[in-house]
Amino acid sequence: MSDYLSRRSFLGGLAMAALLPLTPAIFLDSAEAASVALIEPPRIRSSKGVLNLTLKADETMLPFKGSKRWALTYNGSIPAPTLVLNPGDTLNIKLANATSMMTNLHTHGFHVSPSGNSDNPLVEIMPGKSFQYTIKIPKNHASGTFWYHPHHHMFVAKQLSAGLAGAIIIEDAIDKQSEFKNSSDRVMAFADPRIGIDSSVMDTYMMDQAHGRLGENLLINGQLSPQIISKPGVVERWRILNACSSRYLNLTVENSEIWLIATDGGRLSEPIKIESIEVAPGQRAEVVIKPRRIGTHRILDGSEAVGTLKNTKQASQSFSPKLMGVIPTLAATNSRTIKILGKGLMDMGPGQDSHEMLYAFDGNKFDPSVINQVVKLGTTEDWTITNESLMEHPFHIHAWSFLVIDNGDGQPEEGLRDVVSIPPSKSVTIRLKFNDYKGLTVYHCHNLDHEDFGMMGIVQVK
Ligand SMILES: [Cu+2]
């Protein structure tokens, strides 16, 4: 992934090799010496049912590789503070926009009102202005890992990849059982910002609109190749957030068991042992990592090392938490189909006009004055998203999480999701219960350059 890192590790290895017999341990040691400990974003907790917070979105110079890089931050940190709340709490956020662009705020994955000054993606906050959000989290809200990021159409990919993102944790009684109470509960936000010294890192190129922008480095909590040092004798619980604008993650940890315990919309009914952690843009995965032996184990995205996990003592605790995830049993009373149509560069033959390049739902570019889907409050619907383009697209809808009842290969998937990837030439069916809230909200591609270019629609629940 990083030329700098692999070169540095390689040179470190060479220097050591002159003195020591060549064993793999040399490379582990040099990688370890080069690592910095993973820094967790600060956690801000609700008190007596309320969390009051001011978030200032502003330009910031951050330390990076011994120099500085330009970023957008909430309150000066990447990731932004982690907000910790309980079901039934109220989240009051005053968002102060000190950037030079319009912005707003989305509480991604929350089942809350999409209207007024709640999780309303159509709010516009001008540069220099503030907006007061009040988000009432229902008493029966799932616990899990959610996140917040800007959602102003045409600026989302720029602002998110520049750094505007933070995690939200909803906790409940199950988080207090011993397996979890003793674990290392970490937020790990993966992002691939473009690196530069000014706002030109946000520039959008034609290839970005076609494929989605990619940064040079995959960072964890804003850090390049950090090291996680395990607390002796306890398991690692990682709340993984894919905050990349378009990059899909496929994570593994060497020499370790991986147990999936929660997806986007909350806990599974029981832990599932998995071989790798696949996280589409916008998705979350809560996992428990148990190294099989003591040592320094690389964290890999595909074949690229993006960090290390060091453990000095095996986890002694048995791991058999009761998760009791809520998986609703529903029957759909209505169904509809949404087609992903369009042309990216990949789809076009020679000689075609690149300005035709556009992915869109049902061929319609986003128009804030057009309602694309009307749904009756309280109904359960099956939505089949058919991908007739040549590229994979992560489909996301606000305010309601869903079950994947057909992942494109005729198989259901575990857990509740709010993002599901639609492979090319496949149809994926999701089941949504449109309960509790009337109003307008959006569904869109979470490859955010696609969204900014118009791959979004409005759903009205009434
Ligand atoms: Cu897309």
Image: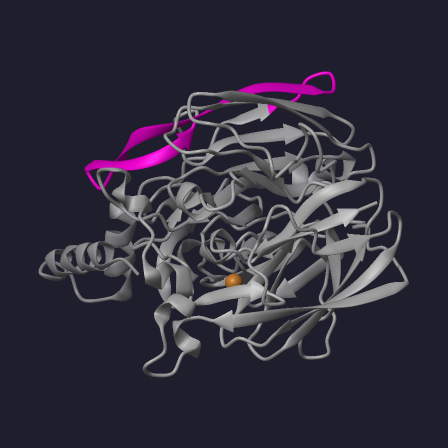
Q: Is residue 411 above or below residue 130?
A: below
Viewer can see residue 92:
yes
- Between residues 436 and 35, which one lies in front from this camera angle? 436
Residue lying at the far bottom in this picture: please name it. Answer: 350
Residue 459 falls inside the magenta stretch: no
The structure residue drawn at horizontal position 36% and vertical position 45%, both measured from the top left corner, is 226
The structure residue drawn at horizontal position 42% and vertical position 48%, both measured from the top left corner, is 191
Residue lying at the far front in this picture: please name it. Answer: 369
Magenta stretch: give its range: 45-74
- Between residues 325 and 329, which one lies in front from this camera angle? 329
x and y percentages locating residue 378 in the rendered image? 89, 49
- Between residues 437 and 84, which one lies in front from this camera angle? 437
Residue 70 falls inside the magenta stretch: yes
The structure residue drawn at horizontal position 33% and vertical position 49%, both measured from the top left corner, is 225
Q: Quadrant of residue 122?
A: top right
Residue 231 falls left or right of residue 370: left
For the stretch drawn in magenta, the main secondary structure is strand
Q: Which quadrant: the C terminus?
A: top right
Q: Which quadrant: the N terminus?
A: bottom left
Residue 306 falls left or right of residue 177: left
x and y percentages locating residue 458 in the rendered image? 67, 50
- Between residues 96 and 17, which one lies in front from this camera angle? 96
Viewer can see residue 142:
no
x and y percentages locating residue 129 in the rendered image? 48, 21
